[in-house]
Image (cartoon, helix red, strand yellow):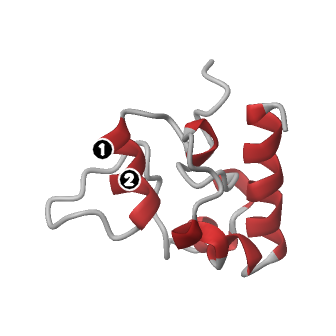
Amino acid sequence: MNELEHIGYCGVDCGVCPDYLSGKCSDCRRSLWPDGDPCPPIACCQGKGIACCGQCGAFPCESMAGFYEESEGHRAAYARMQALRGD
């Protein structure tokens, strides 16, 4: 099993995300977005050919800084991406 299979491009663990569990956010790794990506990390990561923000040389980028401060789950996502990088 891929270690990122249940982790969003942003680093959020979908299995414990209230937005995912309530249906507000879909599984970004298995969804097709015919009208464009509603979530910036999806388009950015796919465009760069990387599996998640933590694999980006610009991590943490300015456009994601606010996201990673929004909630405890997002702060956990940031820590997860740092750990993936070995920071």
The residue at 62%/50% (across/down) is 59
In the image, 54 versus 58, the foreground residue is: 58
Give the percent coordinates (x, y) of residue 72. 84, 73
The residue at 82%/59% (across/down) is 76
Q: Compute the Cα span from label 1 to label 2.
A: 5 Å
Residue reaching furthest top?
1
In the image, 26 versus 64, the foreground residue is: 64
Q: In this image, 30 relative to 54: left or right?
A: left
Mark 2 residue element: helix
Mark 1 residue element: helix
The residue at 78%/78% (across/down) is 71
Residue reaching furthest left?
34
Q: How busy is the neighbourhood of tag 1: few (under 14 within 10 Å), some, or many (20 plus)?
A: few
Instruction: Identify whether 62 is placed above or below 61.
Output: below
- Amino acid beneath label 1: Gly
The residue at 25%/51% (across/down) is 32
Give the percent coordinates (x, y) of residue 4. 62, 33
* On-image quarter of the N terminus: top right
Residue 66, located in which quarter of the rendered image? bottom right
In the image, 13 versus 82, the foreground residue is: 82
Query: Disc 1 marks which residue?
Result: 47
Instruction: Say which mark, if any, is on residue 44.
Output: 2
Instruction: Identify whether 71 is placed above or below 35.
Output: below
Circles 1 and 2: CB atoms closer than 8 Å: yes
- Amino acid beneath label 2: Cys
